[in-house]
Image (cartoon, helix red, strand yellow):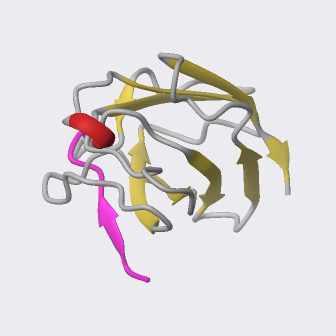
Amino acid sequence: WGASLLEDNLPTDNYHYQVTVQTGVRKNAGTESNISFIISGEQMDTGVRRLFDGKRKRFQTGSIMNFIMSTERCLGPLTFLRIWHDNTGNGNLRSWYLDQIQVTDLQTGERYSSSSLTEQRHSFQDFCDVIGG
């Protein structure tokens, strides 16, 4: 259950979060589409980030993937998560069934989790409120 660094992390960023993404177990839940997100906190937001480590191109059905995201500073208590994909995967790997996301502040240990509101099979974007864990 190791974690990969997000490809768009900046070397000057010193604050770190672990983003754990769980893809659902339904048939064709996985994707090869590009996934992007924004996490907002009370102090700032991440801006648009890409959920990609530069290596793995597929979110497998039933997989749990861990990423380390760096930011310039603490986002503050997390309030909102927006996540979407661009439908560029091939065939059955175009859509995505997101089951759950957990974001952990690696400095404080505070965890925030969110459950997917829709399957994202027919929509371009899915909006999730982050619930303090």
Q: Is residue 132 above or below residue 1?
A: above
Q: Residue 92: within the magenta?
A: no
- Closer to us: 45 or 1: 1
The image quadrant that residue 78 belongs to is: top right
Q: Is residue 128 left or right of residue 107?
A: right
Q: Residue at x 25, y 43 (%)?
A: 32
Quarter of the view holding residue 110: bottom right
Q: Is residue 101 above or below residue 126?
A: below
> In the rendered image of this protein, does residue 3 appear above or below residue 12?
below
Residue furthest out toward the right = 132
Which portion, as a residue range, is magenta? 1-8
**Residue 95 x %, y %:** 40, 34
Tally of numbered tags:
0
On screen, residue 130 versus residue 48, left or right, reads right
Dominant secondary-structure state across the stretch colored magenta: loop
From this viewpoint, which residue is outermost toward the top? Answer: 124
Q: Residue at x 44, y 65 (%)?
A: 66
Q: Nearer the viewer, residue 87 or 41?
A: 87
- Judge from the rendering whether residue 99 lies leftward or rightward of residue 84; answer left or right: right
